[in-house]
Amino acid sequence: MNNNIPIARWLSMFWLCSAVSLLLGQFGGSVTSNGTNGAALTVTGILGIFCTLVQFYPFYRFSRLSERLQRAFTASVLGMAAIVVELLAVMLVPSDTATYTPSAFYRLFILITLAGVIAAYVSQFWLYTGLDDICMERGYDFPPKRIRWCFYLSLINILLRMLPTSIPIFLSQIASLVLLALFIRAAYQAEKLTV
């Protein structure tokens, strides 16, 4: 693995896409019966997909730094592939089929969706533990194991989604972005010293 690649620039791109995705997620909602909200949802959906696709490039750049970051990239690609397969499968369902029909097709949807979600969380685990390893190897001025809290906060989000409000979820996602921004600042400072 090539450990001399500067990481701060790619982390900044990753952070920006994550922040835009978070903001776009706040505009989500149900489509109204007269269709006034449909165009906004389509635009936010397209922009969200674009941000997700743009995040693959920094992931690819990270994958050359360590084994853990390579695993994060692989899990991220597998998670996105599962989402794409699930979306294509949903389009194949006849529109007159009730969603509560206990068919094998819907069970397959659930399994594919579950596989995508698990791959996303596995990807986050490898990403943040890999960044923690790089932090220690390169001697960043950032407390050890603190970047892993981005992963822990995403696990806490799973529990918070059971609450009737989305405010705690938004706050924990903001906290994750703040931690990542502090890590990026430490990476920039360390990379300036080595240049």
Image (cartoon, helix red, strand yellow):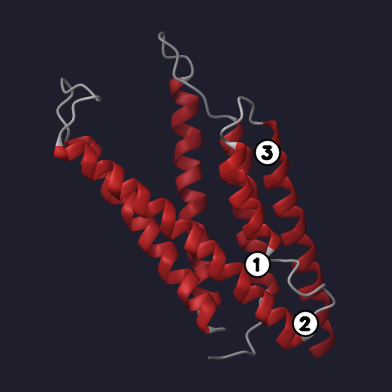
Left or right position of 180 against 45: right
Asked if residue 89 can be seen in this view, the reply is: yes
- Measured as percent of width and height from the top left, residue 166 is found at 64, 31
User: Badge 2 local density, few (<14 within 10 Å), some, or many (20+)?
Assistant: some
Q: CA distance from mark 1 to mark 3?
A: 21 Å
- Measured as percent of width and height from the top left, residue 124 is found at 55, 62
- Measured as percent of width and height from the top left, residue 178 is found at 77, 54
Q: CA distance from mark 1 to mark 2?
A: 13 Å
Judging by the rendered image, the residue that carries numbered circle 1 is 11
User: Badge 3 local density, few (<14 within 10 Å), some, or many (20+)?
Assistant: some
Badge 3 amino acid? Phe
The numbered mark at residue 191 is 2
Identity of the residue drawn at 70% across and 72% down:
8
Q: Eyeballing the image, is 93 above or below 29?
A: below
Judging by the rendered image, the residue that carries numbered circle 3 is 170
- Measured as percent of width and height from the top left, residue 110 is found at 30, 42
Badge 1 amino acid? Leu
Quick one: SS at disc 1?
Answer: helix
Q: Tell us which disc is closer to us: 1 or 3.
A: 3
Identity of the residue drawn at 40% across and 9% down:
33
